[in-house]
Amino acid sequence: MTDERVLAFTPAWKQAEMVAAKQISPVELVDAYLSRIERIDPQIGAYITVAAEQAREAALEAEVRLARVKRSPSTSSAREGHAGVLPPLFGVPVSLKDVEATKGIRTTLGSRIFADTVPENDSIVAERTRAAGAIIIGKTNTPEIAIHLETVTDNEVRGPCLNPWDLTRTTGGSSGGAAAALITGLCAAAVGSDGGGSVRIPAAFCGVFGIKPTQGRVPRARGLGKGDPNQFAQSGPMSNNVLDSAILLQALSGPHPLDPQPYLREPAPDFVKPVKELMARGESKPLKGVRMGWSADLGHAAVDPEMASACSAAAQSFASLGAEVVTAEVKFSADLPEHFWNVFGANAYMQFGHFLEDPAKAALMGRSARTALERGRAIPGHAYARSLRAVNELRLYVDSLFEKYDIILTPTTAIPAFDPKDRPTQIAGREIHAINGFYPYTFPFNMSQHPAATVPCGFIDGASGKASHLPSGEGMNGRADRTAKAPAIRLLPVGLQVIGRRGEDADVLIACAAFEMAQPWQGVRPAMA
């Protein structure tokens, strides 16, 4: 029997191989994660709903299916006769953010309005997750309707999601439950969603990998709200390694007739093959010839100096992988937050604003979600139109940057995880935007539609505020128990953002995989994990 902790942090791709080889059963995997959830989740609040009964049923069905598998005599791959190869995540427990409708599993959107809702249909994302063979282990915590004006994961259904590295701090939002579940080994992989940084912020705060795909890469439909244009948001994978996210992104990607977005109607390219090939080659200079532009502030942002230092060192390390790394000439407009919220807020009102007109439902809404929708309702048409023009101008500007660079690098956030009762109003002595101030790097790339990922690249000591390497002194490959021996140090993860050309999600994954191979981060985890 494999040790539960080792099994919990075994990559999802490896778990799928073990299941196919009948080295472990889907039921054993599900039971291992359910055991950890029962023991650890009460401390952090990563899940709104744990789908224990449904997951065990799905695991038993997977075992019946696996019993029919015939192994090819010439290879070690598992096959199902005429049914073809087992799906890529067969038998692997995966979590979904509780904004995805899931047939037979409670879906709340973090709102008391939906507190008892059990959908009769899956969203496209949930449907494709199941089609990939994954077992939905539960629905992770999210702010109500995935919007919290303070960008934390909290709601009146489950309560706050706490950061496993320091329970006084937030995971960020809005995919905070997914990030917390991953870093503590409460699922093998996760699906979040990102409308302004909601995958990347929690992933950075918790020390896991996450990618916001190119806009339109992952279709979004069959949710619980009304349809909206969805110019900014994308569902995206989160994981403890890059390959797992590549596999999950492959499963989620591709056009769908119900998707309202006019982007990327062509089939998705292969995201998995180039990552596997890079890993197999093991080259010392896998990114030779790749042009990378590093920007500490996008021309205007306030950033904690230690955060900038840690991310700059990580960015420069790409040179040792063969890339050409230069300081990028980037100048984003300081009025982007206004244009972002005009479009984002109006679209949110279009999707959920009808709740404001129903007194009974309005009374069930939390303050932050209600305030966000009221702001969306108040946006005049001319302001929305002006902001749409600004969005298009930004898109063209970012496209022009990729004439000089193949990849752009920035910090993911301007500060590490913070105490939600002490949300920063200043960074490095400068006043910051009330909403977007601590994540000035993420939301512009939702506006511009470009793929953007975050990779763990170091730590800041929460006590001293100083950036540091891992306490093991072994780069990003230290042991988890090293943190317990230094109680005076409160490690807070730092994320490096990696941005690519529109449609070139594979380039982002390749760059992140190369970084992971050079500076693997999986070995250091919070003590509770």
Image (cartoon, rainbow, N blue to C red):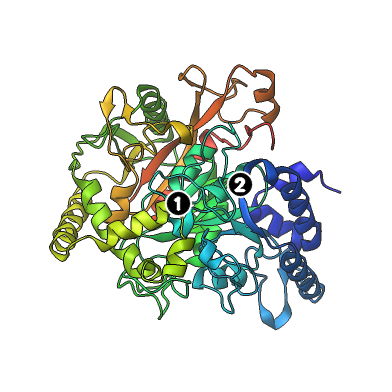
Q: Nearer the viewer, mark 1 or mark 2?
A: 2
Q: Residue at x 61, y 68 (%)?
A: 116
Residue type, label 1? Ile
Instruction: Give the mark nearest the N terminus, 1 or 2.
Output: 2
Please say if 427 is above or below 367.
above
Q: Which mark is residue 429?
A: none
Q: Which mark is residue 211?
A: 1
Please say if 501 is above or below 264.
above
Q: Residue at x 40, y 81 (%)?
A: 257
Q: Residue at x 82, y 73 (%)?
A: 67
Pick whichever, 363 or 446, lies toward us: 363
Residue 519 visible to an observer of this rendering: yes
**Percent position of residue 357, x then y:** 36, 70
The answer to which image quadrant residue 97 occupies is bottom right
**Percent position of residue 436, x then y:** 32, 42
Question: On the picture, is 106 further left or further right than 112?
Answer: right
The answer to which image quadrant residue 80 occupies is bottom right
Q: Residue at x 43, y 71 (%)?
A: 225
**Percent position of residue 342, x then y:** 24, 56
